[in-house]
Amino acid sequence: MSNKVIEQRDYRLLTDDYRLSFPMTHILVVDDEPDVQPLFEQRFRRETRSGTVHLTFASSGEEALQIFNARPHEAVLILSDINMPGMSGLELLRHIRTVTPDRPPVVMMITAYGDAESHQQAMDLGADDFLAKPLDFNSLKEKLANLPV
Amino acid sequence: MNVPVLVVTIFFLLQTRNFLNTKEKMPVWDKRLIGAAVILASLFVIDKILDTNGAYELKATWVCYVALAFNVLVVYIASKRYPPARALLLSLIPFLVVLALTSFVRTFLPTSLYNPYKDVFETSVGFAYVWVFSLFGYAARQRKSYSKEHQARIDREEAERRERQMLEGLVQERTQELTQQKAEITRQKEELELALSELRATQDQLVQREKLASLGELTAGIAHEIQNPLNFVNNFSEVSVDLVAELLEERQRPADERDAGLEDELLSDLSQNLTKISHHGQRASGIVRNMLQHSRTSTGQREPTDLNALADEYLRLSYHGLRAKDKSFNASFRTELDETLPPVKVVSQDIGRVLLNLFNNAFYAVQQRQISERQSGTLKGFAYQPTVVVVTIQTPVGVEIQVRDNGTGMSEEVQQKIFQPFFTTKPSGSGTGLGLSLSYEIITKGHGGTLLLDSKDGVGTTFTILLPAT
């Protein structure tokens, strides 16, 4: 674990020039379930080790917004649960879209309620994709690989 | 022939008819009286003719006496039933006696006996005439007053009879009314009894429906709550398959190239994943178990229950249930649980129902406020953060559970009625109006506790459950 923390700190200290030489996807994962973190870490083990993906986790919309506001350039992709207590995923999406309208990150919404209404709402607010739970990691990785970075 | 006697006799024969009204009451005697008068009148004519011839004198005066006597007899018979006739009798008898006696003495006895007392006899006869008419006048007056009285009595009797008849009619009418009323009351009683038993049956049905309704509200929440752990079970098992593959791959490498650190990491992840799979599996089965418990009819058995777990679980179920129905709805909810709370002996299904009901109401209240705040269009309105909090506290006298919300709150008027059955502030069809009244019964009657309400219109509501230490 300690190894990982150092790794993360290292990435944050990297200069823009150095970072640009490595195509790395920064993903901010927002979910109120704490077990989402180990799941994503294991799923993206190889990518993290090879340095193509860097994961950051937030357990609420408020926390996610804080992280995003501090380092907007870091968040390239946000996987957010629509159905969260407090600030909902949709509200978070709206905030993100208003904070950095010039450099919008790719936002993918994930929800347990895969209904058309939520889908439409997310799309209207400017989501790039809409995924239903249970999450298919293979298709997610595929989508991440084809990101217009 | 004594003319005055004849006149008087005929007069009385005819007057008697009139006096006694024999024409109607004694028709036989009436004819005889007329007959007597006619005979006397014709006798007078014959007597006059014969008298003129001077052949012999008829004893017509005596016939008059006989006729008078006959008259007296008729009046006597009538007097038994008709009191005024007695006065008439009193007038006739002395007259007849005096005149007959005088005639008798003058005609048949020696003149020596009559002459010395001639004055006396003549005076008596005079008196007799005065007597007979004055008493007749008296009798006539008596008759008049009697008939007046009689008429009055008849009228009175008639009036009484009518009144009696009216009263009888009234009594009969009243009796009939009472009988009808009694029948009506009996009918109503039967109807009411029927209605009561129907009401009881309906009440049971309603209680059952309220249970099902709250279960229905739960379903979406339950689906979400089960789906989540199941997703984790699936995800962690899938990723574990990958980890095992990676581990096997690593172990097939030559010994000097193997990364011991990676192997350890993979193994510890695997072990962690298995713990998580088991944890989430248990979470799912716990929800299913509780759902079954909720729908099952309460056994009424009190068992030691972890109220913290119960409160936490139903809070989530309630939130997700409401969230599933209204996608635009969002609220913060949190628990402030007293970790030192010991297990409390309660009927967990019942307390679960109460908590679910309070949570549903709380979320409904904050949802309603959120809608109206957004409609207000003000900055403050958009800053409104719907929040529901459940608090458990161990107190010296028992356990306290608070359900707080910053929703619409209630007016004094609504607070007065909120525990009444069928009272609801929700639009018709949305609420049964039984949730809080059943909750109140469960807490007070079922557990000997108290359900308190503290609410302020436009600020929020706190329901407090106090369960005594057992």
Image (spheres, coloured by chain):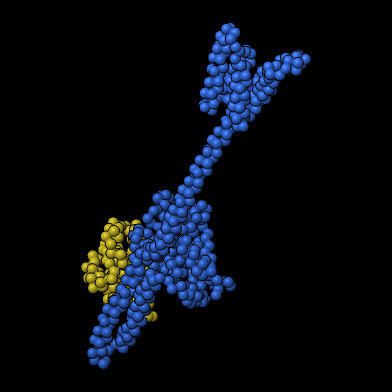
Compared to B110, does B214 lie above or below?
Answer: below
Q: Residue at x 31, y 67 (%)?
A: A112
Taking the view exactly as shown, the residue that stands out farthest to the right is B116
Q: Which is more toward the observer, B344 or A3?
A: B344
Q: Quadrant of residue B354?
A: bottom left
**Image quarter in which the C terminus of chain A is found:** bottom left
Compared to B12, does B86 lie above or below?
Answer: below
On the rendered structure, is B337 left or right of B265? Answer: right
Q: Which is more toward the observer, B265 or B296?
A: B296
Q: Position of residue B426 (x, y in %)?
A: 41, 55
Q: Position of residue B125 (x, y in %)?
A: 70, 16
Q: Quadrant of residue B160?
A: top right
Q: Residue at x 51, y 57 (%)?
A: B455
Q: Which is more toward the observer, B150 or B15?
A: B15
Taking the view exactly as shown, the residue that stands out farthest to the top is B52
The colour of chain A is yellow
The colour of chain B is blue
Taking the view exactly as shown, the residue that stands out farthest to the bottom is B255
Q: Position of residue B112 (x, y in %)?
A: 75, 16
On the rendered structure, is A109 left or right of B92? Answer: left
Q: Which is more toward the observer, B71 or B161?
A: B71
**Image quarter in which the N terminus of chain A is found:** bottom left
The answer to whether residue A134 is seen in the rendering is: yes
On the rendered structure, is A86 left or right of A52? Answer: right
Q: Position of residue A72 (x, y in %)?
A: 34, 64
Q: Residue at x 53, y 20 (%)?
A: B35
The answer to whether residue B152 is seen in the rendering is: no
